[in-house]
Amino acid sequence: MEPYYQDETVRLYLGDCREVLPGLGLQADLLVVDPPYGDTALAWDRWPDGWPTLAATTASSMWCFGSMRMFLTHGPEFTAAGWRMSQDIVWEKHNGSSRAADRFRRIHEHALHWYRGKWGDVHHETPRTATGVDRRSRVAASRDSRAEHLGTYSERTTWADDGTRLLTSVLQARSMHHGAIHPTEKPVAGLLDPLIRYGCPPGGLVLDLFAGSGSTLDAARQCGRRAVGIEADERYAEAAARRLSNQVIMFDESA
Ligand SMILES: C[S@@+](CC[C@H](N)C(=O)[O-])C[C@H]1O[C@@H](n2cnc3c(N)ncnc32)[C@H](O)[C@@H]1O
């Protein structure tokens, strides 16, 4: 099948991922997927049946965006396909889009990491942040300063303060209301970037079955990974292709 868009690092296909993917014969290092959650009565918000099983044929590691309601409803489909959950991340937005006045204003979404097989075989490298860059790392630093900075931390572990801290499980990143090319577009900086760095080695292949605006492909390319995406709606495939063809490729040598 001919890609709808391609360059040296990225390919985008137009079509239903359940029809397109089997013909591509791909094995990816990491899936980053953001399916329609199926949470609302909106016409476009329809859960594509069977995709977790299909996804399991292409990779052993996956970040999946979704709502708690979505994961409670469809969680059994993930486990039936052999996926095991390693952790959940909360994306805290600066603002929410919910118009419901009968509940708390929703300003977050989840990203769950799933894997198959042995955890030790799955690439995972938690990104770190410099101490003091954000409030949480400053709190961690003040707590750590009461302990020995070098030497025995417990019976079996030694710990040295290298001035960095693990990124926390709550990622704060502005949502894409202004300048977005897709109604549910995910931001690259602060969200897709750390998720991809965590789960895909430099130069590795990221696969997005629901590519939308091409944000995952863009993020992967910017941090020195390759990417393949599939999008069913031609309006979004076209917008993604435009986005990707206008972009200056910036490889981060420190990755
Ligand atoms: C939640 S949006 C993804 C948004 C994307 N993460 C972004 O940042 O722009 C889901 C996308 O999946 C597409 N889609 C829905 N069903 C699909 C299917 N079976 N195969 C491929 N794409 C599909 C929709 O057209 C929509 O653009």
Image (cartoon, rainbow, N blue to C red):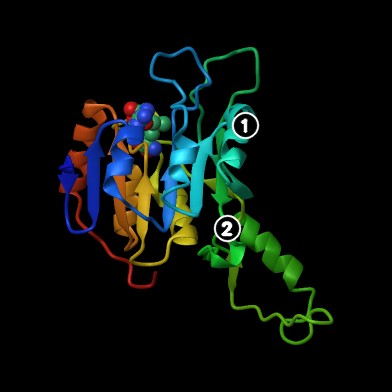
- Is label 1's Cβ within 8 Å of ligand 1? no
Image location (x, y in percent) of residue 3: 18, 43
Q: Residue at x 50, y 39 (%)?
A: 65
Q: Quadrant of residue 21?
A: top left
Whether residue 130 is visible here, answered yes or no, is: no
Residue 158 or residue 16, whichever sits in front: 16
Residue at 22% in and 26% down: 235
What residue is pinned by disc 2?
117
Cβ atoms under marks 2 and 1 closer than 8 Å: no
State which quadrant residue 9 falls in. bottom left
Compared across the picture, whether 143 is left or right of 19 comes to right
Secondary element at tag 1:
helix
Residue 193, percent across and down? 42, 54
How busy is the neighbourhood of tag 2: few (under 14 within 10 Å), some, or many (20 plus)? few
Tell which circle, 2 or 1, labels the residue nearer the N-terminal end: 1
Q: In the shown orientation, is residue 149 left or right of residue 20?
A: right
The tag on residue 2 is none
**Which quadrant would residue 214 be assigned to in this image?**
top left
Per the image, the residue denoted by label 1 is 68
* Residue 186 rendering spot, x and y as whole percentages: 41, 39
Give SS at disc 2. Answer: loop
Indicate whether 171 appears above or below 156.
above
Q: Is residue 168 left or right of residue 186?
A: right
Q: Is residue 17 above or below residue 86?
A: above
Splitting the image into four quadrants, where does ligand 1 fall?
A: top left
Of the 4 image quadrants, the one containing the N terminus is top left
Label 2 residue near ligand 1, CB within 8 Å: no
